[in-house]
Image: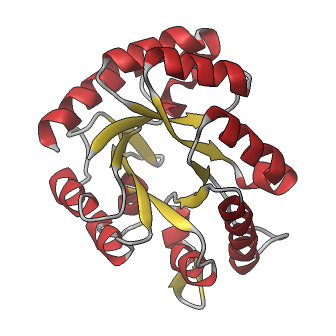
Amino acid sequence: MKIGMQIYGLRNELEHDFEGTLAKVAAMGVTGIELFGAHKSASDTKAILTRLNLTPVAAHVTFDTLEADLDGQIARAKEIGVGILVCAWSKANDHQTWEQIADALERHAQACNAQGLQYAYHNHDHELTETVNGIPALDVIASRAPSVKLELDTAWLHAGGVKPSIYLEKYADRTILVHIKDLRKTATGWDTVELGQGEVDLADTIAAAKKTSSHWLLLEQDNSPTPLESHGRNAVWLKANS
């Protein structure tokens, strides 16, 4: 499998120096990236990625942004050359149920498919801990939105109380992207940490990821006091252990 990177963890560095930061990512031996945010225009982003020989694997967009501007997000993705649009975050609340979210995701997926894009959903832990009639919200989405593929974030599966490999195996055919990250429990929640420094069974997780439909293992560390250094060490670790 190819090694890529979700660049959310480098958001502050990218805001300061977009191309320079991506050049450092490319120097880590990463060959593809998953975009988050719109730091540059679509045309400028495409030109920078081309210069750095980085593949735009996918783009993360929040549920609310997709609801407000689905056509615009599809157009941007196509201009950059992104093949997969990913719903990065959603959550049921007083105004929308998980069933309503799933129905909206299905609509998004059908619109993307009509434009030649794939569409996937990225989980956090709450899609495992929140349920509908006893069924985890992630499974509700998977069953109610058949056109939606999955981008399973293995660390957040762990945080949600499930073994990541179980969901990777359960949805092997639906999983077209995999986030490889590590974390540990703290007194106030969860901290993402460098690979091999946390609680996730990474060997079992990576073995299961290789049996999915994903061609990419995407590195991500949400937070670090030294983001570039942490991402560099994560890249070295993953290349040695995958």
Task: Estimate the x, y position of residue 1 in percent, counting from the top left.
Answer: 26, 47
Q: Is residue 68 visible?
A: yes
Q: Is residue 144 above or below residue 104?
A: below
- Say which residue appears at 21% left-offset and 27% top-offset: 236
Residue 57 drawn at (x, y percent) = 49, 41
Tell me, what colour scheme is on the image? secondary structure
Residue 89 or residue 111, whichever sits in front: 111
In the picture, the quarter occupied by the C terminus is top left
Task: Name which quarter of the figure residue 63 lies in.
Answer: bottom right
State left or right for residue 212 relative to residue 12. left
Residue under the point 71% across and 63% down:
114
From the viewer's perspective, is 116 left or right of 207? right
Q: Position of residue 6 (x, y in %)?
A: 47, 37
How many circles with numbers are drawn on the protein? Answer: 0
As drawn, 119 above or below 237: below
- Is residue 195 rendered to the left or right of residue 106? left
Can you say whether 229 is above or below 178 in the image? Answer: above
Left or right of 225: which side holds 69? right
Measuring 69% from the left and 72% from the top, which residue is drawn there?
106
Q: Nearer the viewer, residue 169 or 50?
A: 50
For the point 60% across and 37% down, the residue is: 81
